[in-house]
Image (cartoon, rainbow, N blue to C red):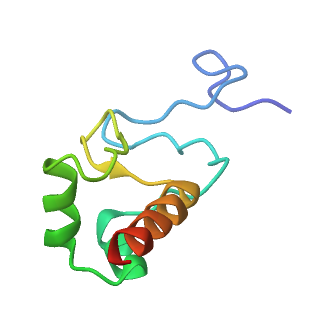
């Protein structure tokens, strides 16, 4: 049986403008800059300094808020690079 308001929404769900639609499921987990710094054992400020200096590759950015989006593989590669730099 259809919706009582079948004239306005026969098959799809309508959200009021003030409500967000559910986001699609993620295929993998993004990490935040603070999480990455913690994993690497450095401060967030140090991580950002290394990014600005070009010592580390800049990660992808979220189109809606420009936040850095880190993939776990990138973090592992950066960790290896930091270990080599210490030697």
Task: Report the side of 31 relative to 23 (left or right).
Answer: left
- The x and y percentages for residue 61 are 33, 40
The image quadrant that residue 84 belongs to is bottom left
Q: Residue at x 21, y 72 (%)?
A: 44
Q: Residue at x 53, y 30 (%)?
A: 14
- The x and y percentages for residue 21 are 49, 39
Residue that protrudes farthest toward the right in the picture: 1
- The x and y percentages for residue 1 are 86, 33
Looking at the picture, does residue 68 appear above or below residue 5?
Answer: below
Foreground residue among 20 and 52 = 52
Foreground residue among 10 and 61 = 61
Foreground residue among 40 and 24 = 40
- The x and y percentages for residue 47 are 23, 66
Looking at the picture, does residue 50 appear above or below residue 57?
Answer: below
| Number of numbered callouts drawn | 0
Looking at the picture, does residue 17 appear above or below residue 23?
Answer: above
Residue that protrudes farthest toward the top in the picture: 7
The image quadrant that residue 9 belongs to is top right
Foreground residue among 2 and 18 = 18
Q: Residue at x 46, y 69 (%)?
A: 79
Looking at the picture, does residue 68 appear above or below residue 49?
Answer: above
Q: Residue at x 60, y 41 (%)?
A: 24
Q: Quadrant of the C terminus?
A: bottom left
């Amino acid at each position: 049986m259809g919706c009582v308001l079948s004239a306005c929404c026969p098959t799809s769900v309508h959200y009021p403008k003030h409500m967000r639609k559910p986001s699609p499921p993620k295929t993998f987990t993004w990490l935040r800059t603070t999480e990455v710094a913690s994993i690497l054992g450095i401060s967030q400020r140090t991580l950002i300094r290394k990014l600005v200096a070009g010592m580390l590759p800049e990660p992808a950015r979220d189109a809606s808020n420009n936040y850095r989006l880190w993939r776990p593989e990138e973090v592992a590669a950066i960790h290896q690079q930091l270990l080599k730099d210490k030697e």
